[in-house]
Amino acid sequence: MKASVIAHKDFTISKIDDRVYGAFLEHLGRAIYEGIYEPDHPTADANGMRGDVAKLVKDLNVPVVRYPGGNFVSAYNWEDGIGPRDQRPTRLDLAWHTSESNQVGIHEFADWCDSVGTEMMLAVNLGSRGVDDARNFLEYVNHPGGSYWSDLRVKNGRKDPWDVKLWCLGNEMDGPWQVGHKDAAEYGKLAANTARAMRMFDRSLELIACGSSNADMPSYPDWERIVLEHTYDHVDYISLHMYFANHEKNTGNFLALSHKLDTYIETVAATIRQVKSKKRSNRDIYICFDEWNVWYHSRQQDRVILEGNSGWPHAPGLLEDIYNFEDVLMVGLILNTFIRRSDVVKIACIAQLVNVIAPIMTERGGPAWAQTIYYPYYFASIYGRGTALNLLVNSPGYDSIHADNAPYVDVSGVYNEEEGILTFFLVNRHASETADVEVSLQGFTAGQIVDHQVMTHNNLEAVNTAKNQNEVAPRKGTGAKAEGGTLSVQLPAYSYQMVRVKV
Ligand code: AHR
């Protein structure tokens, strides 16, 4: 199979916001406890944070981490997680039917963010609480001192405010599973009032209103329109979530889900434009895709806990998807979609970061390792920074339930002007054919290939485990050439690649 691509220096989409490579950590399962925090672990630091996990996170150069939920936030009292640890209450978490010890709260999370070099993106509870709680939390986190909440923060050991800019106004409020679920108008009014109060404190905050939990919600896409009609002048982003599943074991359909993602983004982008026109507004609102990932491997095994049949355990293993090689391709396709839609998707968070539907897994007292999907996320986060190119791609395709003629070869291209490097991320969706891809580099003078990474495996279901951590891992590619203005690269059947060319 042959595919051709034109990459022209002047055909650009947008400067990519680095925060599109963000992540998410929720008080859920073993994400926090036994994930980032395990005081008895041999690698734990003075704060009880696992050093082996911190190293894997640091390597990813995650720009921003959303916290503390997720569904959890909708009945969370943030004050439970401050002050002396031995006086913090244990609460029942209704979202995941577990107990929350509150041994990690905002202070511990903020210190951990500092240690791994990332920024916080905080969510306020608009489920069981509202404006009052949001303004208090904001004052605690961002005010220098001289007020009740800021002085309490100082007393609790943190002198300087954290100055958090990104704030989520609740989580998935369209979902009936959410504590304090609301209809679009109720939520829109509450989000607008909360945003107004938060902006009275600081006009420079970046605020995110909840969009749909997924594109199959009955309220979608009216939800976005109604919420934006209430909030357009007060927020900066509307959030979207999407999880990808291959229940039917049909790889072709699964990998075509990135087209459904693209349509979802396009629909919400159009809704933003519609409300902008209706409001006669000059402001632009963007998409914050603050939960995305493959999620289905663990659904069956989680049922017992989620239905409440095992009581209220603390940090049980929940949503522990073990990712396979097929998921590498899907995650590569999702990230390619975000790069191509970087004109509207400014922030995105892989959900989640550790243990819970996550690229990093841990064993209690044991190792931490990279799941298969760690690698496409790693390559995009490290090398996908710069300007997204508007590539012209010509590839044979196939019909799927999500798209007709879905191209076998999916490509995104990023030009990093400071480094003078062009990076391409490529996925071959074909089950049996190698793709010979020729990229015509126009407006660039191609130099040597500076990096070429390939991920293939003869078994789509191959996974990494504690004992066999490198079953699915990238290897150096060979054979790619950049000559006479053309980059030539061969993509084996079902493969993910990254090629970087000095220009
Ligand atoms: O990431 C897991 C859960 O998925 C989050 O808590 C929720 O927001 C979504 O439904």
Image (spheres, helix red, strand yellow):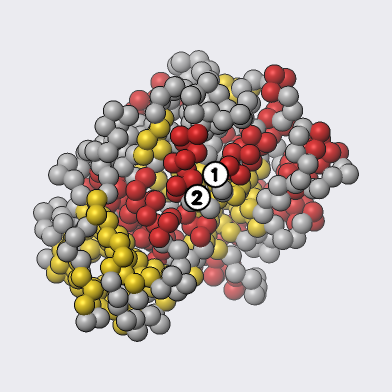
Q: Nearer the viewer, residue 421 or 215?
A: 421
**Which residue position is annotated with label 1?**
116
Query: Secondary structure under badge 2?
Result: loop
Q: Position of residue 56 (x, y in %)?
A: 44, 41
Mark 2 and ligand 1: say if the CB distance to the nearest ligand atom is below 8 Å. no
Outermost bottom residue: 443
Q: Nearer the viewer, residue 459 or 271?
A: 459
Q: Are marks 1 and 2 in contact (CB under 8 Å)?
A: yes
Image quarter of the N terminus = bottom left
> Is 126 situated above or below 450?
above
The residue shown at (58%, 42%) is: 115
Does the closest atom of ligand 1 sit within 8 Å of the Cβ of label 1? no
| Residue type of the residue flagged with mark 1 | Val
Question: Residue, x 35% and y 84% (percent of image)?
Answer: 443
Query: In this image, 50 relative to 158: left or right?
Result: left
Point out which mark residue 143 bears.
none
From this viewpoint, is residue 117 visible? yes
Residue 39: percent from the left, percent from the top?
55, 24
Position of 27 with respect to 333 (left or right) is: right
Nearest-to-viewer mark from 1 and 2: 1
Q: Quadrant of residue 225?
A: bottom right
Residue under label 2: 62
Q: Quadrant of residue 266?
A: bottom left
- Relative to 417, is 175 above or below? above
Dot 2, crowdedness within 10 Å: few (<14), some or many (≥20)? many
Image coordinates of residue 203 in percent, x first then y, are 75, 60
Q: Residue at x 64, y 20 (%)?
A: 90
Q: Mark 2 belongs to which amino acid?
A: Val
Residue 271 higher or lower than 470, as above or below: below
Give the mark nearer the N terminus: 1 vs 2. 2
Label 1 sits on a secondary structure element that is: helix
At x 64%, y 34%, the residue is 108
